[in-house]
Amino acid sequence: MTGRTLCGVLGHPVAHSRSPAMQNAAFDAVGLDWLYVPLPVAPDRFREVVRALPASGYRGANVTIPHKLAALEVADSASEAATGIGAANTLTFADGHLEAENTDAAGLQRALERPMTGLRTLVLGAGGAGRAAAWALREGGAAEVAIWNRTPERAAALARDLGLDHAERPDRAAVDLLVNATSVGLDPRLGADDALRGLGLADADPPAVVVDLVYRSDGAETPVAGWARGGGAHVVDGIEVLVRQGALSFELWTGRPAPLEAMRAAARSARA
Ligand code: NAP
């Protein structure tokens, strides 16, 4: 134990995470002598490790794959967002109490920097990121939130959970905002044409606004972001959403406004 206040990111694996670079840059920028570390933890040890963190000097932790469901279950209380989404990406420890939050949803809302009221929206993907995105759009007042997923049963289940539409064959041209919440684009070995075809985007024009939650470890542009930019859309990339969710976690732990520029610069220059 260092005597410093600690925060960390729990994942399995977690070595690729840009959060340590981003959060340590934020602590530096506001003059806090805190330290943020990667915490690789296997699923069968998650509960035990989380419970030991407060006594080891930890103020909070981010949670990534595969622990987001377990993070909600281990917490003493949870926010409306974490409960509604069914997963948590942020834990805050205070006075022996463990609070779960999901900043992925509000991070997406902040990254958009525009009202989503009345928009027709489509979410591609029904995993953890898709759940948070669909919840964020619904809560943000979107007029329509349709969900498409490669495995249709998962989209149907998510739509049912959130009271939304499940689109087996959604019209990509009839939306104002599209969110890619699949992991398509993560693997550089999959070419852009194949990636776009797999998502039903190859022959479509992008809508006015496209969010691609995927970001590549080498910093290269993702197929969906490239398609959207080439078609003149306003593009919000995965790093910007990462920064915004991290900023909200930072504010929960420190009680201070997040230094967004420092976080953005660190997240963009960090390489796995
Ligand atoms: P997940 O729970 O494993 O879900 C993966 C999703 O991708 C599922 O909907 C899956 O469909 C779909 N998928 C995978 N391969 C596909 C393919 N070849 N064609 C079509 N769909 C495919 O993962 P997650 O946690 O939701 O994360 C999804 C992505 O979002 C990841 O790349 C992650 O890095 C990113 N993410 C970014 C942020 C951020 O802050 N920028 C935050 C969270 C997540 P099936 O159900 O059919 O398998």
Image (tube, helix red, strand yellow):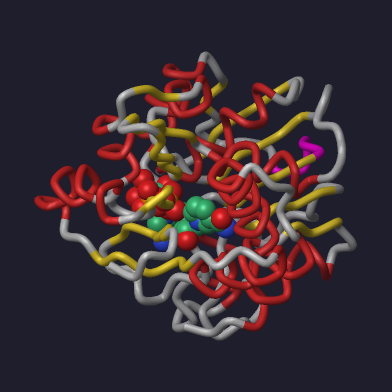
Taking the image as four quarters, which one is ligand 1 found in?
A: bottom left
The reply to whether the magenta stretch includes residue 23 is no
Q: Position of residue 30 (x, y in %)?
A: 71, 63
Placement of 172 over or under 266, stated as above or below: above
Residue 191 vs residue 63: left or right?
A: right
> Looking at this rendering, what residue extends furthest in the top direction?
163
Residue in the image at 71% along x and 34% along y:
121
- Of 96 and 124, nearer the camera is 96
Highlighted magenta segment, given as a residue range = 172-176
Q: Quadrant of the N terminus?
A: bottom left
Residue at x 51%, y 64% (from the top left corner): 34
- The answer to whether one can see residue 139 in this image is yes
Q: Position of residue 155 (x, y in %)?
A: 43, 32
Q: Is residue 183 visible?
A: no
Image coordinates for residue 102, horizontal then vertical, percent? 50, 37
Q: Residue at x 59, y 48 (%)?
A: 254
Q: Main secondary structure of the magenta part?
A: helix
- Residue 3 coordinates in the image, percent (x, y): 37, 65
95, 178: nearer the viewer? 95
Query: Vertically, is 57 above or below 163?
Result: below
